[in-house]
Image: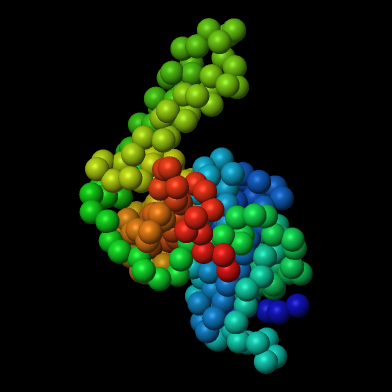
Amino acid sequence: MTALHLVDEREAADLAAFLSRLLHYDRGAAVRLQASGTALAVFGRPPSFEVLAVRAVRLAKPYEDGLDVTLDVTVSAGELLESVDETAATATVPGAVTGPPWAGMLPPRRGWQAEPGLPASDSLRALVAAAVAEFKARTGELAPEARTRAELDRIGREIWSRTVARTDLPVRAVHAAQSLGFLRPAAASDGADGGPGEPVLLASGPWLRLRTPYGSIALRRAGTAGALGLSVR
């Protein structure tokens, strides 16, 4: 098995926290790893949010495994989490698994352009809190006989499919960022995906990407859920 050497204990702890959050939503979660040089990208898909989550991890030295200088493999998130040694700042790449469909269809690597209209991080966190409160209030008002899974899902879709300000970004993408630990105050961590700063909304073709200092959320714009435009890698 191949060892990954992370830059420090904090980076290892952040990776472990990200994997733990993915496993909270899916005990059988898989992640796709792509490494080249000193950068490792970890892709996951928490099913509750229907988005791709991307955590960038900094390596202490360039990835190298014999004659291979790049890594591209889908593995068990649970096995990867078990291999993380925070004190030593290392992790071991588990054996490959048969990846879920999403693992073969990732967002493009290049061509991202900034999109205007995204509110500041504190406003985004307040937006998520208000949406959660609305969901609880509306479902709490339902009569017992009306409190069906279908009705709860309908209310959830209505709330989480709303777009943020004047952008095409659905609220569920911001909720995913908050739930996965990506939407934190800048002082909470040094981050590994562009350094401290405000979240940025990017677009590339049909894809949208909410990038924060701690990770990214990627998804396709509404109405483009088909196979066209997918980057199969």
Residue 79 in view (yes/no)? no
**Between 167 and 142, which is closer to the camera in this rendering?**
167
- Location of residue 126 in the rendering, given as x and y in whole percent from the top left corner: 32, 38
Q: In the figure, is residue 66 to the left or right of 149?
A: right
- In the image, residue 56 lies at what x, y percent? 49, 68
User: Left or right of 170: which side holds 148?
Assistant: right
Please provide percent x and percent y for residue 226.
52, 48
The quarter of the picture where residue 144 lies is: top right
- In the figure, 36 relative to 218: above or below? below
Residue 123 relative to residue 212: left or right: left
What is the quadrant of the N terminus in the image? bottom right
Residue depicted at 64% across the width and 54% down the height: 101
- Whether residue 46 is situated above or below residue 187 in the rendered picture: above
Residue shown at 49% from the left, 46% from the top: 225
Q: Can residue 49 be seen?
A: yes
Residue at x-position 23% and y-position 49%: 117
Query: In percent of the image, x 58 and y 68: which residue is there?
Result: 233
